Amino acid sequence: MKWISTLSDAPTLPQALEAVASATEQSLKGQKPDLCLVFISSNFLPGYESVIPFLQARLGPRVILGCSGGGVVGNGREVEHHPALALTAAMLPDVTLTPFRVADSSLPGLDVSPRQWHHLIGVPPAEQPQFIILADPYSIRIENLLMGMDYAYPKASKVGGLASGATQPGENALYLNTVCYRSGAVGVALSGNIALDTLVAQGCRPIGKPMRVTKSDRNILMELDGQPPLTILRDLFMTLDARDQNLLQHALFLGLVMDPLKSHFTHGDFLIRNIVGLDTEKGLLAVGALLREGQTVQFHLRDAQTSADDLQQTLATYASRSGRGQLGGALLFSCLGRGEFLYGHSSHDTRLFQQKLGPVPVSGFFCNGEIGPVGGTTYLHGYTSCFALFRPLYVTAPASAGSGAVAVQPASQPPLF
C-alpha cells in the first residue's frame, strides 16, 4: 500500500494540474495508481470539467473520486480562501474498488429490503466494504442516504463530506471516473486488503452535569430532570467563569449520549448537536436532533482551545492503541468553520495529525458538513474534523527463515471509535 499526496497553489488551473501530475508521476515511477482522490478549490469553478480528462490522460487511474471545496488539504498543508488543487494517488494491491453514484431520485425508502441498497451501491455486504462518500448539499437527502447505508452495511465504516464553495445549486463538482457531476452523491467502496479507521473530533467539552430528557416533542427540548432547560442554563451560567459565561451565550451545544447502557461518560461518548432556537417565555430549546424521553444529555461549549484539545486527545488515544507504523494514508474532512476561521492560522489540524501519527500523507477538503460515525452510527456533523485512516488489513511475511513460504499475519487492530 502506497499513498502519494500532492498540492499546488498555482494561480491558474492548468498550472496546478501540471504541478500535481508531475509530482505524482515522479513518485509513481511509471506505475498507474489504483485510486486518485482530487479536491479542487472553488476558485477554479470555471474549469471544473477539465480536471478528469487531464488526470485520465496523464495518470490513467482505475478510479477517480473527488469534489470541490471552499478549501483543500494536501501534502501536509491546508489552503483556504485561495486557489489550490490537492491530489492523492494510492497504490492498493489486493483491494477491490467499487465506485458508485446516487441521485436523490434513486434513494430507496428506509423501510425496504437491504437488498435494494446493495443493488444501488453495487457491492454485497459479504465483501466487507468500507466507504468514502462525497455529496452535494443542495440536491440529495444525505441523512437518508447515510441511514440507508448503515441499515444495509451495518459493520462498514463510512466517512466523507459535503462539497462546498458553491453559492447556488449546480455550482459544486463531484468527480467519479470520467464524469463531473453537479448533483447527488458519489463514492467508492473499498474491500479486500484494506482497513478504514475513522476518527471524529467534535471539538467540544462538557459543562454542568449529565441530565435526563424528561419531556420532549421531536426536536423540542421541554424538560431536563423535570425542569425547563432555560432554567437549568440560567443556574449553570452563574457557576461558570467569565470565559465560559461568554461561550455559553454564543457557542453552546447539546451532547447526546449514544450508549444508553453507560452510566459514566468520557471523551467520545456524546453526539454533539446545535441549539437552533429557544423560547424564552416557556423556557424551551430547539435542538438539531430528534430527542427521546429518558435520553441522557449534557450541555457542551466549543472554542479554538477546546477544539484543539479535543483533536489532540482523539489522535493521542488512537496513536497509543494502534501504533504509528502501519498507516498508508489519510483523508481529512474538516468543517468550513474550523481552519483559519477558528484557529487564526492555517494547517492546524493537519500539523497536529502528523505530530501525533507521523508523516502520513493527508489530503481532503473543507466541507459543508462532515460524515463520520459516533457510537457505531454514521452522522452528518458540523464543526468537526473527520479523519479516514487507511492501513493494510493484513501483511505478508516469510513463515520461517529459508522456507520460501509466505504466512498471512493480521495487522494490529486499532480501537473502534
Image: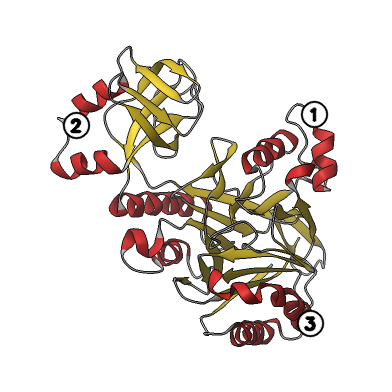
Q: Give the residue drawn at x 33%, y 51%.
A: 309
Amino acid on which disc 3 is placed: Ala
N-terminal-most mark, 3 or 1: 3
Viewer-nearest residue: 312 or 193: 312
| Mark 1 nearby-residue class (10 Å; few <14, some 14–19, many ≥20) | few
Q: Is residue 283 shown left or right of residue 1?
A: left
Q: Is residue 202 shown left or right of residue 97?
A: left
* Quadrant including the N terminus: bottom right
SS at mark 2 in the image: helix
Amino acid on which disc 1 is placed: Val
Question: Would you place residue 375 above or below residue 177 in this image?
Answer: above
Q: Residue 237 bears which disc, if any? A: 2
The part of the image, by quadrant, that contains residue 341 is bottom left
Q: Residue 296 bears which disc, if any? A: none
Q: Which residue is mark 3?
A: 57
N-terminal-most mark, 2 or 3: 3
SS at mark 3 in the image: helix
Q: What is the CA distance from the residue labelled 2 to the residue labelled 3?
A: 60 Å
The image shows residue 17 at horizontal and vertical percentages of 64, 82
Viewer-nearest residue: 217 or 413: 217
Q: What is the CA distance from the residue labelled 3 to the residue labelled 1?
A: 41 Å
N-terminal-most mark, 1 or 2: 1
The image shows residue 401 at horizontal and vertical percentages of 74, 67
Q: Which residue is mark 1?
A: 112
Q: Is residue 51 shown left or right of residue 303?
A: right
| Residue 391 visible, this orientation | yes
Amino acid on which disc 2 is placed: Phe
Q: Give the residue drawn at x 43%, y 31%.
A: 287
Q: Is residue 264 shown left or right of residue 11?
A: left
Question: Would you place residue 207 above or below residue 167 in this image?
Answer: above
SS at mark 1 in the image: loop
| Mark 2 nearby-residue class (10 Å; few <14, some 14–19, many ≥20) | some
